[in-house]
Amino acid sequence: MAETSEHAWNETDLPDLTGRTVVVTGANSGIGRTAAEALARAGAHVVLAVRDPERGRAAAVTLSGSTEVRRLDLADLTSVREFAAGWDRPLDILVNNAGVMMLPRQRTRDGFEMQFGTNHLGHFALTNLLLPYLTDRVVTLSSAAHRWGDATIEFDDLDLTARYTPRRAYAQSKLANLLFTLELQRRLTEAGSPVRALAAHPGYAATNLQSHAASPVLRACMKAGNRFLAQDDRAGALPTLYAATQDLPGASYVGPDGFAETRGAPTLVGRSRAAADPLTARRLWAVSEELTGVAFRLVGGDVARP
């Protein structure tokens, strides 16, 4: 739990990560970049997994510590497979950070609704393909949006063809992130793996994620909110860093400890009833395997350090 004394947990409390390797998706900007910066400063070798390598390199040169840039487009399962096929060494921590938010109706290269396809299916495939190399944990970014309205997994219409709204699609994808974490942890435990699956959310953090909202009015409101209400991306990255480095139980969910979990120091937080349903989590996993063609596997067990 986050500290309640005079000192609230922050990035200066990160342990020494020398010798550890971390992959952060979407690490060229926002919370991903800030988390990558802190992890590299703590001694980790950080791989910035980004859709645009040029932007990734521009971000990497501003970071202190050991970094590299690799291309990864989560909206393209071929790109996800290529990234994983190029991985050949132990991986301590995978941070599934990248995401899109409240876009106009779009589809991924594989034909999935863009928010569900990028935020959930892309990370689902990436995680399972990298599992044989993972030694410590997977941290997946969700959002308080998983509680919005009647957020649910629309199994009969995952693309929301009949009732698409940017808000409903985003909420579904963030709910999927939590259900994925829940079922991944169950499978890891059942397999006797020491790897842990955790989730985090940043609260209300000012990033460029909100700038792609479908509605001009919503974009204007978010711009004003980012300026006057939101915490900065450094504070928004704290739950990710806490989940990535602290000794927490599997399936833990980390968020800010302040009002309505919008800001504050990182702590363990609750989730909606829908996000804690193991039957829905198992059903989502089965559907995700079918859609991506990627299954849970711990080939050869844990990858030993050289």
Image (cartoon, rainbow, N blue to C red):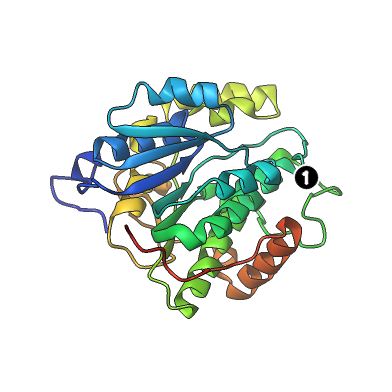
Residue pushed farthest right?
162
Q: Is 206 on the left-hand or right-hand side of 292?
A: left
Residue highlighted by disc 1? 110
Rendering quarter of residue 157:
bottom right
Q: Is 136 on the left-hand or right-hand side of 144?
A: left
Would you place residue 82 above or below residue 177 in this image?
above
**Callout 1 crowding tier (Cα within 10 Å): few <14, some 14–19, many ≥20:** some
Rendering quarter of residue 249:
bottom left
Q: Position of residue 287 (x, y in %)?
A: 73, 64
Residue nearest the viewer, comparing 224 with 67? 67
Residue nearest the viewer, comparing 139 with 93? 93
Residue at 14% across / 50% down in the picture?
Answer: 5
Residue at 45% across / 30% down in the picture?
Answer: 30
Determine if residue 2 is in view: yes
- Which amino acid, mark 1? Asp
Q: Is 237 on the left-hand or right-hand side of 126?
A: left
Which SS class for mark 1?
loop
How many numbered circles does the render carry?
A: 1
